[in-house]
Image (cartoon, helix red, strand yellow):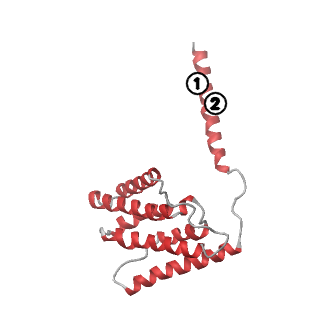
Amino acid sequence: MDGAMNGMIAGEEEKVQRNYWQYLSKMKGTGRSPLQINVKDSITGLFGGFLTISVLALLTSMTASEWLMAPFGASCVLAFGVWNAPLSQPRNIIGGHMISSFIGLVIYHVLGSEPWAIGLAVGLAIALMMISKTTHPPAGADPIIIMLGGYGWRYLFTPVFIGSILIVLFALLINNLRNDRNYPTFWL
């Protein structure tokens, strides 16, 4: 009986070890980067990011309102650098920032800014963006900024809503200046 039991245990250990190595082998990657270097795209990204962020920064310096937040820089990378990706579309830019910021504000005002509450807000933002088909990676930072900065509900309007709208507006204008681009690829 002991021999059979030892054999079963050894078999299970071997299976666990095999699964462990299989799991680790996934981290090697599967090939080369699919991204291609294109000078025209780089120049469009330079122009789009420069113009969009400069306008938002200028509005911030000229008014008493905040128009700019750090995740908008990452949103510009998507809107001008990978303009045709699903995560770069207007629905995702506006919806992702609005959902994530709203979650950040709710959690902050209900639970405070404890480390676990910040983690909960980011996790909920990810889940709700995925469910609503508005996933926008830069928006994942919104709850962190809101909760660490102690922002109030006005932050949802400016910079979040108005800033997101302006990013999409500039993406529409700049991306469509090129004949080989058609932005957005979808609205809804």
**Residue that carries the numbered disc 2 in the rendered image:** 14
- Outermost residue, bottom side: 62
24 in relation to 54, above or below: above
Q: Amino acid at mark 2?
A: Glu
Image point (47%, 69%), residue name: 71
> Under tag 2, what secondary structure?
helix
For the residue pair 115 and 100, the one nearer the viewer reads as 100
Image point (54%, 63%), residue name: 88
**Circle 1 residues within 10 Å: few <14, some 14–19, many ≥20:** few
To which quarter of the image does residue 21 belong? Answer: top right
Mark 1 or mark 2: name the one nearer the start of the chain: 1
For the residue pair 112 and 180, the one nearer the viewer reads as 180
- Outermost residue, left side: 110
* Residue 47 on image: x %, y %: 59, 79
* Residue 175 on image: x %, y %: 59, 72
Q: How many dots with numbers? A: 2
9 on left or right of 100: right
To which quarter of the image does residue 112 belong? Answer: bottom left
**Residue that carries the numbered disc 1 in the rendered image:** 9
Image point (55%, 68%), residue name: 79
For the residue pair 77 and 117, the one nearer the viewer reads as 77
108 in relation to 151, above or below: above
